[in-house]
Image: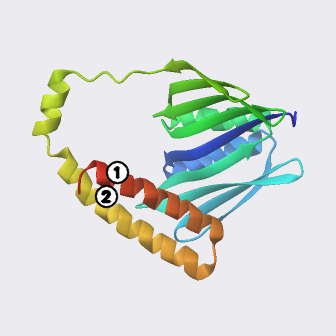
Amino acid sequence: MNRSHEVEYCNLELRFDRRQIQNMIRELIQDGYSLYWNESEHHFVVSVRTGRKLLKLRFLRTMGRYKMVGNYLIRDEKLASWIEKLINDSRGHAVVKRIHDRQVLRIENIMFGEIIRLVEVSGMEHRIIFQKRPQVTVEDMVQAFRSNRAELRAGVLRLEIDYELAVLHEAVQNGWQEAAEASKEKLQAMRTEMLQLEL
């Protein structure tokens, strides 16, 4: 483990079913990590010991599935590789910052398990190395105007917001600061999506 090299995973969002989480726990144990987990009605937390630190991987339970959320700073190279494999395999989203001697060197924006933007950082300078261009055709735009997908998504989004408000309420009532902050971040993202849907 080299403490001068760190990887920070921001706005991580990965989705799993229960079997996949059990497989993840098995993999971590086989890789020699000491860990334990606990579960409540709305959360599943896996605590992994890395040296003297304890890393808590947080999963929110939604309708029989689990969503790994939050921001994580990893100093263990093997664990960082494992999380990147998870992002790829689950087609997840994240902003990955590669840090050396407390300086950010690269920032990767990942959507659906694929890097869509890669930025190299040198002091105050930012240089875009790669950016995936959206490929939208006229036919795609016509289909989007004819589609009722936005209305369907709006209905689902309202239910998700109601659920997340209940999660936030429970977190505030129980004094779970981290869960409350994660919930607020998700509500902010949902608000942005609602505005995009022009609701």
Residue drawn at point x = 64 percent, y = 70 percent? 177
Residue 21 vs residue 112: left or right?
right
Q: Residue furthest bottom?
A: 173
Q: Position of residue 169 (x, y in %)?
A: 49, 77
Point out the image quarter for the C terminus. bottom left
Residue 193 vertical placement versus 111 (above, below): below
Query: Residue 43 or 126: which is nearer the viewer?
Result: 126
Disc 2 + disc 1, Cβ < 8 Å:
yes
The earlier-in-sequence mark between 2 and 1 is 2
Q: Position of residue 136 (x, y in %)?
A: 26, 24
Residue 167 vs residue 153: left or right?
right
Q: Which mark is residue 157?
A: 2
Query: Residue 153 or 50: which is nearer the viewer?
Result: 153
Q: Which image quarter: residue 47?
A: bottom right
Q: Can you identify the residue that label 1 sits on?
A: 193
Q: CA distance from mark 2 to mark 1?
A: 8 Å
Residue drawn at point x = 87 percent, y = 33 percent? 2
Residue type highlighted by circle 1: Glu
Regarding mark 2 in the picture, which secondary structure is present there?
A: helix
Residue 149 vs residue 51: left or right?
left
